[in-house]
Structure formats: C-alpha cells, structure tokens
Amino acid sequence: MSLITLANVNVRLGGRTVLEDVSLALEPGEIVTIVGPNGSGKSTLLRTIIGAIKPSDGMVLRQKGLKIGYVPQKLHIDPTLPLTVRRFLSLPKRVSDDDAHTALHDAGAGHLCHHQMTDLSGGQFQRVLLARALLSNPDLLILDEATQGLDQPGSADFYTQIEAVRRDKGCAILMVSHELHVVMAASDRVICLNGHVCCHGTPEHVASAPEYRALFGNGTHGALALYRHEHSHEHCDHDHDHAPQIGAHTDEEQSA
Ligand SMILES: Nc1ncnc2c1ncn2[C@@H]1O[C@H](COP(=O)(O)OP(=O)(O)OP(=O)(O)O)[C@@H](O)[C@H]1O
C-alpha cells in the first residue's frame, strides 16, 4: 500500500480554490520533490498531506500507523535563551542520549551535540532540525524549503545528507524547494504544481516538459543534465520513475 494517497483533492482557503483536482501517491523509500512558483499551493499541499488542512473535496488516505517527520523552513529560537542541541532534542518530549546521538549522527550533526543552538550556522541548524525529525523513526520525512537561506554548496551538502538518510533509514522523502536543479537531481520523482499538477515524472522528464519550461524557463535543464551526468554512478539505480500515480497520465500524455 502507498504511504499516502491523494485522490482528486480540492482545497479552498479564504473563499478561493488553492488546490484543484490533485491526485498523487507516495511510495515507501522514494524521494519526491514538489516544485512550483510562489503561491502555487506547495505548502498547502504539504499541510494537507500532514492532515493540518482538510480538503473540501476528494480523499486523503494515510497508511495505518504512518509516522511522519517534519523539517520546517525555519524555527525561531530566542537568541537570549541558553539551549544546547542536546536539550533542544528533548523538547517537548524527553529523549534518551542514545536516541539523540543516533539521530544527530544520521543527520550528519554528531559533533554538534553540546553546541548552543544560537551558535549554529544555517546548515548546522537545519541538520539539527533534521535530527529532531528523525527521532520518531519516520516512514515519511517531509521538508518544506528546508535549505532556504543556505548557499548553493550548503544546500547541495544538505540534500546529499537527505539521500544518505533515505539510503540508511529507508524512509520516503517529500520535499518542497526552490533550488530546482540541486533538489531535482536528488529526486526519484518530481511533481510540478501550479494549483493543479502541471506535470510529473523523473527529473529529466519534468525539466523538459513544456508546462515546466513555461513556469521556470529553459535554464534549469542544462544544470540538471550536468549534475546527473557527473553523479550518474550514484544515481543509476533510481533513475526510473517507479512509483505509480493515482489518476496519472503516461509521461507522454501529461499536460497542464
Ligand atoms: N489560510 C489561508 N487563507 C487564505 N488563503 C491562503 C491561506 N493559506 C494560503 N493561502 C493562499 O493559497 C495560495 C497558496 O499558498 P501556499 O503557501 O500553499 O503556496 P506556496 O506554493 O507554498 O508559496 P511559496 O512558494 O511562496 O511559499 C496563496 O495564494 C496563499 O495566499
């Protein structure tokens, strides 16, 4: 069974339709990225998947007992508050030292345990948020623009860590990002959203789809092709679109 299935979901907020007829399914262990322009409904889609927003029409099915870990865009911490990474991980629920160390290690932040939260760099801070999301051993990890504010090498490092998390923990990963070529290259599947699903499929397919190019232009495809080429030895085992989509068209048929 899919981890999450959305069938013909409509979401209305403030009297207008924000998501229209969205159907998708997330399979265990896959990395899926949602791309789309500002205001296209990406955060609304994540919140609908988590269950924070109820659709006005359609159906959201979650696998029984599904555990979701969430990495937010940002988290404000009072700069005057002394708070170590270790203590932060025990808020609001106390966790054992072993669990804290494992989560930090898996997030590539093992050395940060005794640092003050306010002393962390942007990239280190996001890794700690990732560690916190991993504490629950999630089946699905959701990241909402988790690398906003990081420079490009910092973002690329972070997504390399995400790939390692998927490899080591086997959880599925759903993320939203504006860094198209970096994040798309780390994905098995990309969903391009603009209120509705414009197109979807492998990163290569989406990057060359007319609907995607109409939204983002042609520049991204070259960078994506380059990245995939350079890293083809690491990516060859998940270069295909292996996850079925509810109500999806074939790649050739996909249209806005
Ligand atoms: N609670 C709400 N009430 C009314 N309208 C809302 C609400 N939340 C979001 N919207 C509207 O829904 C649309 C989609 O918002 P959403 O935040 O999902 O887009 P997004 O793709 O995540 O945008 P961005 O890339 O800028 O973060 C926007 O026009 C937004 O103003």
Image (spheres, rainbow, N blue to C red):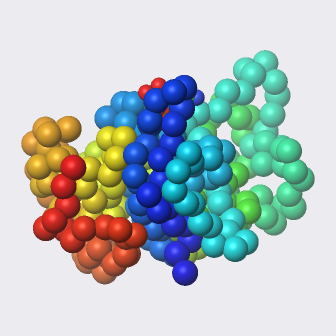
Count of marks placed on residues: 0
Residue in the picture at 10% in, 42% down:
218
Query: In this orientation, which residue lies closer to the viewer: 59 or 142?
Result: 59
Residue in the picture at 63% in, 72% down:
63
Compared to residue 102, the image places residue 215 above or below, namely above
Report whether 88 appears left or right of 148.
right
Compared to residue 57, the image places residue 39 above or below, namely above
Image location (x, y in percent) of residue 237: 31, 80
Image location (x, y in percent) of residue 163: 44, 64
Report whether 101 appears left or right of 210.
right
Q: Which part of the image, by quadrant, shows the N terminus?
A: bottom right
Compared to residue 187, the image places residue 19 above or below, namely above
Report whether 98 appears left or right of 112.
right
Query: In this orientation, which residue lies closer to the viewer: 71 or 200?
Result: 200
Residue 69 sits in quarter: bottom right
Q: Is residue 69 visible?
A: yes
Residue in the picture at 43% in, 43% down:
19
Report whether 23 appears left or right of 236.
right
Residue in the picture at 81% in, 34% down:
83
Q: Is residue 156 visible?
A: no
Residue 134 sits in quarter: bottom right
Image location (x, y in percent) of residue 53: 62, 44
Residue 179 sits in quarter: top left
Image location (x, y in percent) of residue 168: 55, 74
